[in-house]
Amino acid sequence: MPPSGQSTNDLARRRLIAGGSVLGVLLFGGLLVTQCGGGGGQAAAERYSKAWERQDFNSMYDQLSPDSKKAITREAFVDAQRRALSTATVRSLKAGKAGDFKDGNVKVPFTVDTRVFGQIKLAAEIPVTNDDDDSKVTWKPNLTMPGLAEGESLTRTTTMPERASILAADGTPLAEGPERTSPIPDVAAEIAGTVGTPQAGAGDSLVAFGYPPETKVGLTGLERVFQQRLAGRPGGTLKAGNRVLASSRPVATRPLKTTIIPSVERAAASALAGRSGGVAVMNPRTGEVLALAGSAFSATNPPGSTFKIITLVAGLEAGATTPKTEYPFETAAILDGVDLQNAGGESCGGNLAQAFAKSCNSVFAPLGAKVGSARLVAAAEKFGFNRPTPGIPGSALSTIPAADQINGPLNIGSTAIGQGEVMASALVMTTAAAAIANGGFRAQPTLVPVTKPTGWQATTRRVAAQVTRMMLAVVQYGTGDSAAIPGVQVAGKTGTAELVDTTAPGVEAGNPANTDAWFVAFAPANRPRVAVGVELDGAGHGGETAAPAAREAMIAALKATR
């Protein structure tokens, strides 16, 4: 029964009105009226602008009307959107709150952050098909960039400031002026690099930085490494048709002072002596690079026995060996039934220091297998493998396979002696020696002066001290004695990386071309000021060719850093 004073019809009407909040119906005077839709156009514009904000061009295309999709293909749409943002040098877009649907359009404000023109406030009039839930965007060519009116296209004109000079550590120009000249052309030729017009296609990415066509950019050396820093910021005008949307002035940057010491750079180039390979010299405490010659940072090769520094660290940290551990004298290690011979078939062994000094594969390949691939890879990565070198853009990545890809004693043992699939640059192996010199702290290499080095602890001070003593033995009575400097304690490690199986039939024994020669070192060992790394392509044994080259560079660096 209905409550007193209410008819059955009244009660039914109350229930129907209450249900209307869910069902979208209203009852007035006995008439059932459905609520009208609306806001679909605004929602479509919001979805489109949010995808635009993310620069998700495929999602933007998915929201176009069927007629728009007939007028432009997905590929052409994506290309048009990208070209517009590149023209405006856009870094990011931020969409504001969409306005109401009006006359077939929804207005959406945007904050556009650009590299050349700064931050610009623009608005996009986004055409939509209707104001219902199925509303879609009607694309027009002016919808490639906020702020364009129908019939307008986006254009820009830009100019570059004068390219900044590159200075050596003592302030001497290595490259200056439009012609990039230097008062020390012999040094500049080794390190400064060249500028020129990018190869076909390579310049497309420079459009997004605001560079005018035919702008000369760094192609090699320091000119390439510091391209953006040296180029400065372009200036110019961004237009929508005849309207100016934004403008800016070119901004030149100050001369770039590097850490390169001319006398050390000369010595590094002299040590290379026109041979294929690389020489790197650095301050082990700060990571500041004093010289780079050849392909020291731009190419990688198997590091050979210089990698035994890392294997030694991993073995000591894991407790798999100690400085007093004794090893039998043998000519080879047998792993998985395969002989891994010592260089020249030499028989060597003794305590760990003696085995390291003589670079005994017969000791270090089994040691690596004992340590295991997981610990070996982890140690290598602490010394810079599989990590970029942010202080030197464009430097080659030194690599070691993942632990689960180095299977079995033979593969692990080969990796432990710097063969297998290990690849390193002369610079990264120099940083390995530098980390040992610096009490286990690996300072990130840098070509610009630093007040506080960045980096990480690659190993403990205790282990670094143990490895230092063994690296001293390499130069005192081991394979690196040709790097000895009278009156200076030099700690080093040789490497001879096989490029072919030297025991295979038909391979000429003793041919220097069969192996790359390596040597890394630091000095003075008690208070290190200099670390050096040398890699020579197809140059025989590290102790015979790379160690003397490193000695030459070290002497110059020690003189320059007194």
Image (cartoon, grey):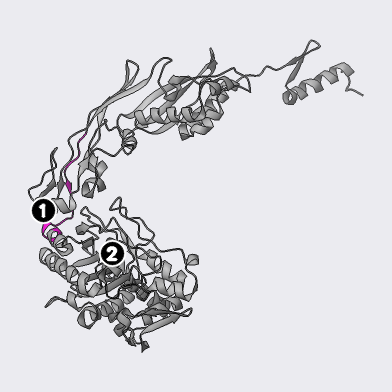
SS class, disc 2: helix
Chief secondary structure of the magenta span?
Answer: loop
Which quadrant of the structure image shows residue 397?
Answer: bottom left
Name the disc covering residue 431, or none: 2
Q: Quadrant of residue 271?
A: bottom left
Let me know if residue 260 is in the magenta part. Answer: yes
Q: Which residue is mark 1?
A: 186
- Specify the quadrant of the image occupied by residue 348: bottom left
Q: Amino acid at mark 1?
A: Asp
Residue at 25% across, 72% down: 542
Query: Of the residues shown, which amino acid type is indicated by label 2?
Result: Thr
Q: Nearer the viewer, mark 1 or mark 2?
A: 1
Q: Secondary structure at mark 1?
A: helix
Residue located 22% across and 67% down the image: 531
Query: Which residue appears at 87% of the width and 16% of the height?
Result: 9
Cα separation between marks 1 and 2: 26 Å
Quadrant of the frame with the C terminus: bottom left
The x and y percentages for residue 359 are 31, 79
* Image quarter hosting the N terminus: top right
* Vertical order, 301 against 230 (above or below): below
- What range is drawn magenta here? 251-265
Find residue 429 and report its horizontal and vertical position in percent: 29, 65
Residue 275 in view in this figure: yes
Q: Position of residue 196 (x, y in %)?
A: 22, 40
- Image-based side of 240 in relation to 518, left or right: right
Tell me if residue 460 can be seen. Answer: no
Placement of 214 over or under 489, stated as above or below: above
